[in-house]
Image (spheres, rainbow, N blue to C red):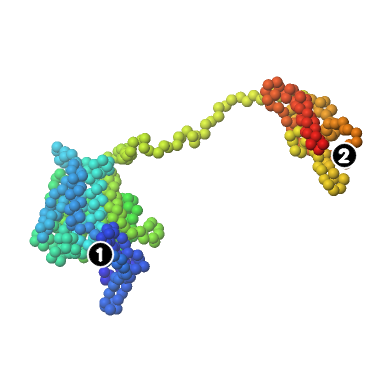
Amino acid sequence: MNKSRNLFKDGMTPLVKSTSRPKWQRLPRCEVFYYKSPVHQNHYVLSFAFGFDKEDEVYQFALTFPYSYSKMQAYLNAVELKFPETFERSSLGMSIQNRKLELITFDDVKKPEKMDPKNVIHMVVILARIHPGESPASYVVQGLIEFLAAANQPISKALREHVVFKIVPMLNPDGVFLGNNRCNVIGHDLNRSWNKLSQYTHPTLSAVMKMLKEYDNSSCYQVDFVIDIHAHSSLTGTFIYGSTYDNVYRYERHLVFPKLFATKCEDFCQEHMMFNADDRKSGTARRNFVEALSDNVNTYTLEVSMCGYLLNGTNILTQYTEDGYMRIGRNLARTFLEYYRFTNILPIPPVDELRPRKGGRPRTHRPRARSKTRSEVRVRPKTTRAYAPISYTDLSICYDSATSEDGSPVRYMYGHGNAGYGGLRMRPHIHQDQFSLSNIQAARFSNLDFTSDFRLKIPKAKGTVQEPKMPPIEMLNVPPKPHLTIIDFNQLTRGGLEEATSGKTIEREKEKIRRHTFKSSSRKA
């Protein structure tokens, strides 16, 4: 807490939950303060403001997502019942306070009849929670266990059939149970005690070291990896600590796994990755196993941040969640797959075999997809085009139409003012066009007269007062707008073009005008 470099400066806030709100939530950043206090000898102090809204509830605060010893036992019991065929659980030893040192094994490798250096069984050892306060490491291990225990997962099945996994989920059960941060029940930091093991003060470390040396000295097994998972309190992202070697070829082989892991994790931070041979870290698992085990063993420390990670190329901090930590464990398993394929230990199957089959509801319950044939453009078949025969003899355009507004034969406008504007009658000019599509008898339309007033002359009785005559109609020659003569297409389909354009249609129009004039005159009378 009193370090100058701390994640509280980067935006990390404590977690809180209550009885009615059992999900862990982070406090708002504006309510958390991390600063040097002159009252506390210029040490850093963390303070935050919180309002207790309900009196009868129990509130709990935490630095990061807790993972207790009882929670681990309950989780292992559930996985053992769910995956009895692939999950193997045993006890590696006992702690000082007689708590079990759990050991999880995934082993579906077929044992060869004759053992030789070419067909040895490869092994991966995972250690976690040597520091009790680094609870995110337990979530990473939980994600790895769930991924490897899945029976129908093709990646986990391929790994179990070619590699043996030994996982110690909680290396310091007494410290976790007591709520310590870094030490065990007698106050020893176990990650600084690998070089001075004692059966009485470090029984869990002694049991793990005994197991590693047995498999490392065996002619049937080859230990490839020993990965110690931790949580970092002052850096962001996920990164790996490794060692340096005088042998160039061993050092190059040692760099392969971190590079593959960086391609699988979007939250991997290469800036924080470090490889050294510091003597001050000789008591850690990473440095001690280099000397205690053979040259084939690659030992790493996998660090995950207690806070979050920065998005690629930005300064945006994304907070880790419980599922985010478990995702790191799943990515760790995928990295093992890539590594063993890279070293030709695992065969490279077709891509279709690695993809899981999509299950779910029957097809009748799925939404109907649009037919692909609807969006396809069908190619029009190539056919020879034959134009319809049209006779261009004796074609003309007539603009005298009873249904056209601009070309109507007679139009009247009545006014009450000046006699010069008493009425208006338009007679459009007849124009012929050689490209007209109507076969019109020009002689008939040229003899038509639409200038007269089609009013029936009714004999008037003597003594009646004659109505005043209308003023003479002035003729205006207005240039017509080009349009075609209307053709009766019903007659065209029945009798042909001549019958459709015959004078019968015009005679009917003249009869309609006479009837209209007769009705208007009778009303006035």
Q: Looking at the picture, how far across and down is residue 157, in whole percent?
A: 24, 41
- Tell me the element at label 1: loop
| Residue at image mark 1 | 56
**Image location (x, y in percent) of residue 271:** 33, 60
Judge the density around disc 2: few (<14), some (14-19), many (≥20) Cα neighbours within 10 Å: few
Assign the C terminus to one quadrant of the image: top right
- Give me the residue at 55% from left, 27% from top: 381
3D distance between C-alphas at marks 1 and 2: 107 Å
* Rendered location of residue 172, percent (x, y): 16, 59
SS of the residue at dot 2? Answer: loop
User: Along the horizontal axis of the image, is 266 left or right of 494?
Assistant: left
Q: Is residue 508 visible?
A: yes
* Residue with the mark numbered 2: 467
Quadrant into which the N terminus falls: bottom left
Residue 503: image quadrant is top right
- The residue lying furthest to the front in this view is 463
Q: Earlier in the sequence, mark 1 or mark 2?
A: 1
Amino acid carrying mark 2 in the image? Glu
- Please name whichever residue, 19 or 123, is drawn nearer the observer in this view of the structure: 19
Q: Quadrant of residue 65?
A: bottom left
Rate crowding at label 1 as few (under 14), some (14 to 19) or many (20 or more) other CA atoms within 10 Å. Answer: few
236 up-or-down from 125: above or below: below
Is 100 placed above or below 58 here?
above
> Is label 1 or label 2 in front?
2
In the rendered structure, the answer to whether residue 26 lies left or right of residue 94 reads: right
Using residue 249 as the reference point, say whether residue 376 is left or right of it.
Answer: right
Q: Residue at x 22, y 45 (%)?
A: 149
